[in-house]
Amino acid sequence: MSPLTLRFDNSFARDLPDFAVPWQPAQAPEPSLVFVNRALGGELGIPEASWQHPDAAAWWSGRVLPEGAQPVAQAYAGHQFGGFSPQLGDGRALLIGEVINTLGQRRDLAFKGSGRTPFSRGGDGKAAVGPMLREAVMGEAMHALGIPTTRALAVAATGESIFREQALPGAVLTRVASSHLRVGTFQYFAARNEHERVRQLADYAIARHDPDLLQADNHYLKLLQRVSDRQARLIAQWMGVGFIHGVMNTDNMTISGETIDYGPCAFMEAFDPRATFSSIDRQGRYAYGNQPGIARWNLARLAETLLPHIHSDSDQAVQQATDVIERFAPAFQAAWLSTFRAKLGLAAPTGETADNAASTDAADTALIEALLALLHTQTVDFTLGFRRLADALERPAAWLDLFAEPEAAKAWLGQWRARLSPQPGDTSATAARLRQVNPLVIPRNHLVEEALEAASQDARLEPFETLLAAVRHPFADNAEDGPFADPAPRDVAERHRTFCGT
Ligand code: AMP
Ligand code: MG
């Protein structure tokens, strides 16, 4: 037992013993910390000084568990690329417990890469330094962008080699999440026709994420509605920063509405709704533009698991669940419009008649889509295409320079400025507001790759640390951008592929 004291309260292991298997992490032979998240640690009540403790690497690699930890491997199923696997589960992960943070919030602490479990199937239960640092940097970037996400607390290199296509340094990541409940967790018991277990899980999920529903009637239906609303907002936020998750399998979709499992994910460079980065997504199932449709599909799978609890009459249950699922598209559309309106500095209509509001919505949607079409046809960088609009207010060339054929862009700029002009606020205030929503710095793929390669192959962490520092300030002033704001050279961007982070 370590002297690291955390306020554990392990509700999942206690209340849902049939949903997980008690299990111990593998012993890393020679652990060393390669990433620590002091700010997040502070929120969890981890004293700053503890990261310097001689045993810190032992704690965060699973050699020595903090007192109160109760590691379990969680069961879940899932649709992967559309095909159902009734048994996935934590094949290389362990929930080590739940900590009540300094804000009184319950947070899961989980290891990833901590060795084989009863759910490992053919896998080795291990993870490599590169993919775990990718998860860390992507999560920090998303958090800084204001997008709900699980986050890395620490990454420890284990001192052992793991074997993929080549030998790679092994690692254990500690992940913090508001929970690890997934759509696939519900599917696990539904697929076994263990409906009482599904009910137990739904009750647990409500108590944890939507406690205000405990007293509501038909709260299972309302849980579905909440999950759907959270996902609608989350996916709209992803779309707003050009993020492509890459593996939106149902086991990678949370009930909490946090982004989880950064594997073959990437931020898009040149705008293309068909963009994918995953080498295993050959059909483009999880392409940028498909993400809302896939979210809806996944939510329908969640709905199926809840049917017996929504209504005793199965036709009624299907009808009510279908109504919720059908509300996903308009909810997403509204969240999308609100996200992109903010990106263009457009105020949502207020105090107007419903008809007028609807026509403003339609006009704004058309304006946004016209810009996206321009970015697409002229292969303009998505991030800069929005960011430089702030500069364009005073110096149109700053933005028009991004376009090979600026005439069409110029016409769009005129329409946008005409839409902006009736709004209050001077130009510099509008520009400042735009810079607070349109990031300058995203984790650009080529820089992420470079940083991970240096860390993995040469144990050189400096490029990773510099990148991390940059993505933590995505809305930085132009003056501070350095190399992190520049798109990849075109040939590099075209070659880019991420591989399933095993
Ligand atoms: P992922 O693609 O990371 O979301 O993982 C999908 C499933 O494969 C989960 O059940 C993982 O636990 C399992 N898995 C992935 N990599 C490994 C590994 N190296 N060893 C054992 N199980 C793994
Ligand atoms: Mg996963």
Image (cartoon, rainbow, N blue to C red):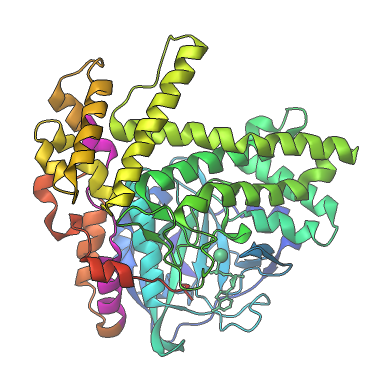
x and y, in percent, of residue 224 in the image: 68, 40
Which quarter of the figure has residue 146? top left
The residue at the point 74 percent across, 61 percent down is 188
- Residue 53 visible at all: no
Q: Position of residue 25 (x, y in %)?
A: 55, 76
Q: How many marks?
A: 0
Q: Position of residue 448 (x, y in %)?
A: 29, 67
Quarter holding ligand 2: bottom right
In this rendering, is residue 190 above or below 412?
Answer: below
414 relative to 287 in the view: left or right: left
Tell me: 1 left or right of 422.
Answer: right
Secondary structure mainly formed by the magenta segment: helix
Q: Which residues are magenta?
A: 433-456
Magenta stretch contains residue 155: no
Q: Position of residue 491 (x, y in %)?
A: 25, 70
Residue 50 vs 243, above or below: the answer is below
For the point 60% across and 67% down, the residue is: 71
Q: Is residue 127 left or right of residue 267?
A: right
Considering depth in this image, is 486 or 35 the residue closer to the camera? 486
The residue furthest right is 313
In the image, residue 331 above or below residue 5: above
**Residue 438 lies in magenta, yes or no?**
yes
Q: Residue at x 23, y 39 (%)?
A: 408
Give 65 or 142, whichever is nearer the viewer.
Answer: 142
Q: Quadrant of residue 345?
A: top left
The residue at 62%/53% (across/down) is 181
Judging depth in this view, the residue of 428 and 408 nearest the camera is: 408
